[in-house]
């Protein structure tokens, strides 16, 4: 009737995967959109004046960001990397039936929700966080 210790019901894994999929897609897409700028010679980092850009012969157009290159790398590591780490930790907790990992995934995703509060994307991080904490607190914790 109840699953053995260490065996997870398949519906829990499916619900967790469904809850994690939107944020994983968004984080992967946003990181994939940002990383090519690191290697683009026509992209300028740390632009303080948006109307001023230095054109080079190889660039027909130029774009830029007010962030410095190191700030962009740090933000990618902290925000997108943190979200992926929280999702991976929570899913690992569900796969191995370890409530501690599920709770750790919950904490990381709640902390990662803070910078996303103003643009509405916090919903996509809180959804898997809720699934992880519910799975950790449910009977058998598995």
Image (spheres, rainbow, N blue to C red):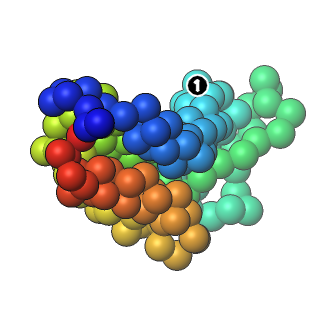
Residue 49 appears left or right of 4: right
| Residue that carries the numbered disc 1 in the rendered image | 39
Q: Depth check: give the residue in front, 63 or 97.
A: 97
* Quarter of the figure that contains the N terminus: top left
**Furthest residue toward bottom:** 118
Q: Where residue 109 appears, x then y in whole percent? A: 34, 55
Res. 60 image quadrant: top right
**Image quadrant containing the C terminus:** top left
> As drawn, is 124 to the left or to the right of 89?
right
Left or right: 40, with 60 as reference point: left
- Whether 7 is drawn above or below 31: the answer is above
Question: Of 53 and 28, which appears nearest the observer?
Answer: 28
Q: Position of residue 108 (x, y in %)?
A: 27, 53
| Residue 92 visible at all | no
Residue appearing at x 29%, y 50% in the figure = 135
Which type of secondary structure does the marked residue at label 1 adopt?
loop
The image shows a total of numbered marks equal to 1
Quarter holding residue 112: bottom left
**Other residues around mark 1 within 10 Å, as few (<14) / some (14–19) / many (≥20):** few
Image coordinates of residue 16 in percent, x first then y, are: 44, 43
Viewer-nearest residue: 118 or 8: 8
Q: Residue furthest front?
A: 1
Residue 134 appears in the rendering: yes
Q: Residue 92, located in which quarter of the rendered image?
A: top left
- The residue lying at 60 percent from left, 52 percent from top is 65
Q: Residue at x 30, y 41 (%)?
A: 90
Image point (25%, 27%), residue name: 7
Asked whether 137 or 22 is in front, the reply is 137
Residue 52 % position (x, y): 70, 57
Vertical side of 117 occupied by 105: above or below: above
């Amino acid at each position: 009737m109840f699953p053995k210790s260490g065996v997870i019901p398949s519906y829990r894994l499916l619900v967790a995967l469904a809850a994690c999929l939107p944020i994983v897609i968004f984080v992967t897409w946003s990181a994939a959109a940002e990383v090519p700028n690191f290697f683009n010679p026509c992209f300028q980092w740390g632009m303080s004046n948006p109307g001023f850009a230095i054109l080079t012969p190889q660039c027909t157009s130029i774009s830029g960001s007010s962030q410095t290159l190191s700030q962009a790398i740090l933000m990618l590591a902290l925000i997108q990397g943190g979200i992926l780490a929280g999702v991976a930790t929570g899913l690992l907790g569900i796969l191995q039936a370890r409530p501690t990992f599920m709770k750790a995934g919950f904490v990381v995703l709640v902390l990662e929700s803070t910078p996303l509060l103003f643009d509405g994307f916090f919903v996509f991080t809180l959804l898997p966080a809720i699934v992880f904490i519910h799975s950790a607190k449910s009977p058998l914790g598995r």
